[in-house]
Structures are given as C-alpha cells and as structure tokens.
Image: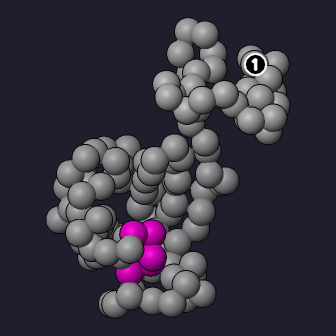
Amino acid sequence: MRIDKWLFAIRVCKSRSIAANLCEQNKILVNGTLVKSAKDIKPGDTIVIKLKEQTKTIEVVLLPSNRLSFTEAVKCYIDKGAIIHVISTKNSGVSRDRGLGRPSKKDRRDIDKLKTEE
C-alpha cells in the first residue's frame, strides 16, 4: 500500500493530498529514509512523521483497504512512545514575535518557566 494512502486511511492526515505534500516536503521517513508518496509500505515498517512542532514514530501493523474510523485505525499501528515536542530556541533562549505587545501575566509566567528550565 502507498504511504500517502495509508496515512489517510489511519487518519494521520485529513486528506490524501496533505499526506502526499508531507512526503514532498521531506517530513516522512520510512525505516530511516526519506520517501516519496508512492513508496509501498508493509507491516513491520517504522514511520517517522515530522509535524509542526512534534515528531511521531509509529510502526505499521495492518494495511487497511479503505479509510477507517478512529477506533479501527488505532489497531493498524503501534505508537512508538509519546509525541516528542521540538522547542526551537535562539541564543537568548526565549523570544517573542514583534508587534504582539506586552506579555500577559500567564505569558510572563510561561517565559520565566522556560528560562529557568534551561
């Protein structure tokens, strides 16, 4: 089964074209190699998906013939650990986009918390 069809069938992506775009943007790795959307996968393959600020590693268990409900789709793969959040930091550690104004009290606490974790 093609990787883009599989990602759509197990509800990782909302549409097959989104799954194909992820492959074009080099965000999908199968067994450690970058793949195109036409790459055939089989049970036992390990897939790494790099989404916005997270990386998800899953192992293929089943190849469904069509799109499944969420409860059925979960049975088609094994999640290899929790989602790993990627935090991008600059030299100063924490930055805010220009034009956002003053940080709120909650934003300020979050910034202080990030600074103390480093």
Looking at this view, name the residue that lies furthest to the top: 91
Q: What x and y, as percent, mark residue 113?
A: 81, 27
Q: Is residue 102 magenta?
A: no
- The chosen color scheme is one colour
Relative depth, front residue between 28 and 95: 95
- Residue at the (60%, 29%) spot, across then down: 101
- Residue at the (75%, 19%) spot, across then down: 115
- Residue at the (31%, 75%) spot, across then down: 15
Vertically, is 17 above or below 107? below
Q: How many marks?
A: 1
- Residue at the (29%, 65%) spot, across then down: 18
Q: Mark 1 highlights which residue?
A: 115
Location of residue 42 (image quadrant): bottom left
Relative depth, front residue between 56 and 16: 16
Residues rendered magenta in the picture: 9-13
- Would you say residue 113 is visible in this rendering? yes
Q: Is residue 10 magenta?
A: yes
Location of residue 38 (image quadrant): bottom left
Q: What x and y, as percent, mark residue 49?
A: 43, 53
Q: What x and y, as percent, mark residue 97?
A: 51, 28
Q: What x and y, as percent, mark residue 98?
A: 49, 25
Question: Residue type at mark 1?
Answer: Lys
Provide the major secondary structure of the magenta segment. Answer: loop
Vertically, is 117 above or below 3? above
Side of 107 relative to 3 (left or right): right
State the SS at label 1. helix
